[in-house]
Structures are given as structure tokens and as C-alpha cells.
Image: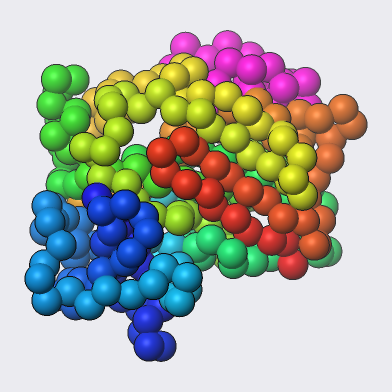
Amino acid sequence: MRYYTILFNGKEKVAASPDGKELFVLEEYQDMNALIAADGITEIPAEAAKVDRNAVKLLSPIPYPLQDVLCLGINYTAHAEEASRFSKENFGGERPYPIFFSKRVAYSQGTDAPIPAYTGLVDSLDYECELGVIIGKDAKNVQKDEVQDYIFGYTIVNDVSARNLQTRHKQWYFGKSLDGFTPMGPCIVSADELEFPPQKKIACRVNGQVRQDSSTANLITGISDIIVMLSEGMTLKAGTVIATGTPAGVGMGMTPPTFLKPGDVVECEIEGIGVLRNYVE
């Protein structure tokens, strides 16, 4: 099943689709967090109103995450190499353990929505196409053979980053957490729709030019290990979003570094999920 949050008759509604074409409004759920807590649906209710996907605005599937988005840094080998070239002080060195950080999200915008440029504050606006994992039920002390039972589904996250703020403050929270820096979408694909772990093509295009082109099979720390490690010391609440890291090809890794500017269109695509498209303004 595919799950959406849409703007329908001026109101935010949760919708589902078996095929990503026709959407059915699920009036009984207040928002996506309520649907996740109920473990989704297995079939479309007979009373659900059918709407044309092209007739509604797609929002982020989770416009208001209940917790900060949890993120993996430097989780593809080639991205580790390009990040170190950009700033060895901030991104180089040995990493015997995964890098975890979080993004504060006041509101997550969806596909075809703007990314603010913050001209005057940000001089190095960057994109990061990532596979997002959605936790389906409260997770604590999860064992490796139990991980799949805790995954509700998958989405696309663009981990937008202000590199000057990220490196200036010697930690990543502020440079990753400006309003509008967490686009998600276009939907959540339920976990049973993809193999585990997902081994899907992941790509990013800027103004039609391919910048990132890899596979989620190339994660250094895989989804099972991520959830096991994080749940050892904290409770991952139902609805928690984990962004699993980005492959090589980000703006800071180019020669010379090439950052986003107003008017640019960024398309993040993951096979089996869809395309998250945003423009810089």
C-alpha cells in the first residue's frame, strides 16, 4: 500500500492507494501519525472516497513528525571520500562507529514545494537524497531478527544542508534544521511492498543533470544495525523517521563545489517509491 497526506477541499487528509494512481481518502484517521499507530490498512475501505491524484496537492506524508528526524552521516563510502575532500577537518578521520545526528522539523514540506535559500545566512545550500525508514511501533531493545516487525514503510527524504553552518558550529544540528530543510515524499510505501533490506536505485538530479546515482544496497551501516543500535539506548516512537544517509554526488563533493541557488529544481528519486521534486526560492 502507498500512503499519502493530501490537501483535499482545503483540508489535510490521509489517503491510500494500492497502485499510486487512484487515491482513496481515509477519513477515520486524523493524520498520518494516527494511521501509523493503527498499523495502516490491508485493503481500501468500501466507504473511502476516490480522488484523482492529479486533482489534489500532495503534501509530505508526515507533515508534522512527532520527534526529530534521526539521520545517518557519511553512510556511503564514496560520499565519505568526497566529504573529506571538501573539509578533512569536519568530515575526515576514522569512523569505527556510525555518525548519528538529528534534524529539527517544525514542518516537513512535500513534493513540488519550495526549499528556502536563506540568502545572507546560507552561502552553501546542498541537497542529499536519502532513503527514509518509518518506524511503525514503539521500539526499544530491538533484536536483529525483529527489525522488520518494527518498520512501517519507506519514503524519500532530502536532507537539505547549509554547509557553512554545519561546519561553522562543529556539529550538524543547526545547519541541518532550518525551516524547510526536510522535504519528504511523495508517499510512504508500506514495508511489505519492498524486499528487506531494500536494494533500490537512488538518484538525484539538479535541473535535469544527474548528480547522485547509487543503490541503497551500498549503505555502510544497514537498516537492521541502525535500528538495533539506536533502540539500545532510546525509545523510537511510532512514526519516527530515520534518514539513512546519502550517496556521493552532493554539491560540496563537486570540483569546484557547486551549491544550490534560487530557481534550481532538485529531484530525488528512489526506485519503487517515486520522485520527490522541490525548487529553491
Q: Quadrant of residue 187?
A: bottom left
The x, y position of residue 114, in whole percent, is 64, 66
Which color scheme did the rendering employ for the protein?
rainbow
| Lateral position of residue 84 relative to residue 30, left or right | right
| Lateral position of residue 233 relative to residue 95, left or right | left
Extreme-bottom residue of the structure: 10
The x, y position of residue 235, in whole percent, is 21, 43
Extreme-right residue of the structure: 256
Vertically, is 263 above or below 152? below
Check if residue 155 falls in the magenta segment.
Answer: no
Q: Residue at x 66, y 44 (%)?
A: 127
Q: How many marks?
A: 0
The one nearer the camera, 233 or 204, is 204
Vertically, is 85 above or below 263? above
The residue range painted magenta reads 73-100
Q: Quadrant of residue 199?
A: top left
| Lateral position of residue 8 relative to residue 180, left or right | left
The x, y position of residue 188, in whole percent, is 34, 51
| Residue 54 at least partly seen | yes
Q: Quadrant of residue 21?
A: bottom left
The x, y position of residue 269, in whole percent, is 54, 42
Q: Residue at x 76, y 40 (%)?
A: 209
| Lateral position of residue 206 relative to residue 115, left or right | right
Question: Which quadrant of the rendered structure holds the C terminus?
Answer: bottom right
Check if residue 89 falls in the magenta segment.
Answer: yes
| Residue 161 at least partly seen | no
Q: Residue at x 59, y 35 (%)?
A: 203
Q: Residue at x 59, y 67 (%)?
A: 113
